[in-house]
Structure formats: structure tokens, C-alpha cells
Amino acid sequence: MRVLVVDDQKSMRGLATYYLKQIEFEEIDEAESARDALMQMQKKRYDLLLLDWNMEGMSGIDLLKAIRSIPELNKIKIIMATSERSVDKVDEATTNGADHYVVKPYELRDLEVRVKKVLAC
């Protein structure tokens, strides 16, 4: 299983990577922007994306929409990881193809539950 953590904050990428390693993922890459993530996805196949919503330039929701419109990438499981808490935002993410949603700051157990749920589908 290969995971891509997309977040413009280095500290959040580091925390997410640490948590993913704790739940036994070994192949974890990081991207600091949506554009960087798209470039990495052209080179490697990912099974799971942990995707921040609020990023400079292209937002996480825009990246989500782009991924879901590309047949070769459409099967990637995507968890939005963001401080956006409103029901409208959760609905927007799921309507546009997010497989799950976790609110920052999250704990290891929060992420683990969502990852297991998404990968079980």
C-alpha cells in the first residue's frame, strides 16, 4: 500500500506520516501542494491520499475533483484531513468523491479508524 500525504504545512505532513507508520504503512510520500501531488501521481500509483483542504494555489477540494475526473486515478481512496468542520464542508467533500473525512487536529486513533474503514470498502 502506497500513501500520499498532501498538506502545505510541513508539521502536519510529518505528523500524518508518523501516524501512518504507527498503523504499519511503510510506503508514504509527501506533497506540499496539490500541483506537487498531481506530479507525483503521474510517476507513482497510490492507494490512499490523506488530503488537506486549505492550501495555497489549488485547494484540496479542487484536487479531489481533478482526481475523480481522471479515470486512471479515480480508484484512489481519499481521506480529507482538514480543520473545516461544518456539515456543508463535509457534504461538499463526500459529494465530490472523498471516501472519508477527519478533522484536524486529529489523534492516531481517529486516523486509524478512518483508514481502516476506507480500505475495507
Image (spheres, rainbow, N blue to C red):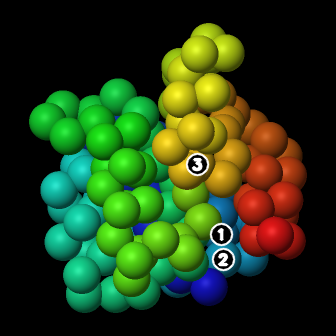
Task: Locate residue 95 relative to residue 44 in the image: left or right.
Answer: right
Q: From mark 3 to mark 1, how far is it between C-alphas?
A: 22 Å
Helix, strand or loop at label 2? It is loop
Q: Nearer the viewer, mark 3 or mark 2?
A: 3
Q: Are marks 3 and 1 in contact (CB under 8 Å)?
A: no
What residue type is disc 3 on? Ala
Q: Is residue 40 visible?
A: yes
Helix, strand or loop at label 1? It is helix
What residue type is disc 2 on? Phe
69 up-or-down from 13: above or below: below
Task: Locate residue 42 relative to residue 96 in the image: left or right.
Answer: left
Q: Which one is nearer the viewer's eye here, 4 or 70?
A: 70
Identify the residue shown where x is 62% and y is 40%: 94
**Residue 98 placed where, x, y %?**
58, 48
Q: Are marks 2 and 1 in contact (CB under 8 Å)?
A: yes
Q: From mark 3 to mark 2, how far is it between C-alphas?
A: 20 Å
Identify the residue shown where x is 34% and y is 87%: 44
59 up-or-down from 33: above or below: above
Name the mark on residue 25.
2
